[in-house]
Image: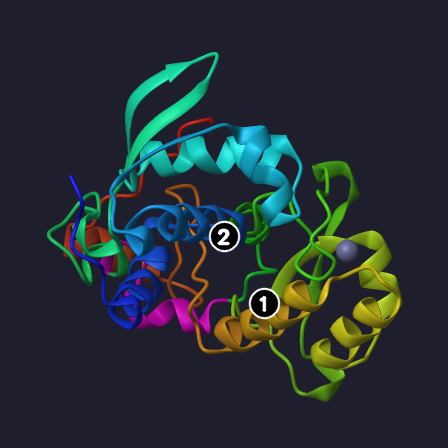
């Protein structure tokens, strides 16, 4: 059955609102957007696809795409209809149709995470917070988009500390060691253009990364913070959360 075509602007806005609440990484978002493009933009909800069939269109290898599809299934953005040697058949839900776990919508997860306080958190303060930034990027360098194993990743200040940057999740990204040492004190946009000139990013990737830098600064890539670390402001927030009756988020299941 042909579905009614979507209002792409609305869907884009809904995705922007949903992604941080579900803790979608940059790759999760990329895969989800691609699947939305192949379904709802074409007036349908279901799609048969294979991981290796779509990965080249995204400039990714199969592993990260497979992981992203698993997470999207877990988080309810996709519904599995069938899986076989031929690939997956899924129903792709619009962002506005995806239920945010633990609450009826906006704000519930933010409350668990400490709400507005998250902006004040020093994400270099503990291992759990540093890992939350790495997890947000999903094992991919924020700059060059190469898969980056955990033994070879590090955190980078998008705006260097000496230029006034902070340790906020809005200014920290997970990247490969090569990008970390090459970028040094360059502005992120300049460094991304350098990667493009060197042929390490396609034109489309460059545009996407420049948008990602803006989205990061605008607070749209909120990391998931788990129970082992309170996400509030320095000192005492753990107790404050306890008083408020907030329970820690469960660890994210392994995917
Ligand atoms: Zn890199």
Q: Which of the two labelled residues, at mark 1 and mark 2, occupies the earlier sequence position?
A: 2
Q: Residue at x 62, y 30 (%)?
A: 63
Magenta stretch in the rendered image? 111-121
Dot 2 alpha-carbon crowd within 10 angstroms: few under 14, some 14 to 19, many 20 or more: some
Instruction: Determine if the magenta segment contains residue 117.
Output: yes
Is 184 positioned to the left or the right of 224 in the image?
A: right
**Where is mark 2, residue-wise?**
30
**In the depicted view, which residue is nearer to us: 234 or 9?**
9
Residue furthest out toward the top = 85
Q: Secondary structure at mark 2?
A: helix
Question: What colouring does the structure picture have?
Answer: rainbow
How many numbered circles are shown?
Answer: 2
Residue furthest out toward the front = 2
Q: Secondary structure at mark 1?
A: helix
- Quadrant of the rendered image holding ligand 1: bottom right
- Identify the image quadrant of residue 92: top left
**Where is mark 1, residue-wise?**
208
Q: Residue at x 66, y 63 (%)?
A: 205
Q: From this viewpoint, is residue 160 visible?
A: no
Instruction: Determine if the magenta segment contains residue 28.
Output: no
Measure how far apart labels 1 and 2 are at the Cα level: 10 Å
Query: Which numbered circle lies on residue 131?
Result: none
- Magenta stretch: helix, strand or loop mostly: helix
Point out the image quarter for the N terminus. top left
The reply to whether dot 1 and dot 2 touch (C-beta < 8 Å) is yes
Residue 54: percent from the left, percent from the top?
54, 38
Residue 178: percent from the left, percent from the top?
86, 56
Residue 214: percent from the left, percent from the top?
53, 78
- Identify the image quadrant of residue 239: bottom left
């Amino acid at each position: 059955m042909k579905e009614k075509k979507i209002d792409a602007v609305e869907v884009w806005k809904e995705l922007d609102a949903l992604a941080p609440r579900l803790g979608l990484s940059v790759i999760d978002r990329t895969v989800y957007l691609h699947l939305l493009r192949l379904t709802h933009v074409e007036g349908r909800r279901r799609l048969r696809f294979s991981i290796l069939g779509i990965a080249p269109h995204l400039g990714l290898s199969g592993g990260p795409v497979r992981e992203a599809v698993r997470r999207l299934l877990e988080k309810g953005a996709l519904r599995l209809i069938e899986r076989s040697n031929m690939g997956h058949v899924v129903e792709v839900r619009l962002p506005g149709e995806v239920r945010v776990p633990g609450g009826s919508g906006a704000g519930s997860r933010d409350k668990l995470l400490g709400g507005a306080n998250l902006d004040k958190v020093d994400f270099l303060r503990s291992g759990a917070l540093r890992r939350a930034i790495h997890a947000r990027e999903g094992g991919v360098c924020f700059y060059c988009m190469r898969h980056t194993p955990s033994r070879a990743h590090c955190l980078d200040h998008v705006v260097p500390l000496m230029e006034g940057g902070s340790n906020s999740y809005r200014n920290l990204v997970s990247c490969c060691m090569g990008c970390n040492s090459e970028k040094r004190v360059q502005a992120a946009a300049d460094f991304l253009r350098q990667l493009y000139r060197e042929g390490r990013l396609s034109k489309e990737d460059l545009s996407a990364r420049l948008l990602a830098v803006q989205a990061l600064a605008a607070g749209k890539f909120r990391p998931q913070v788990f129970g082992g670390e309170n996400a509030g402001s320095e000192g005492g927030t753990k107790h404050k959360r306890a008083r408020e009756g907030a329970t820690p988020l469960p660890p994210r299941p392994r995917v």
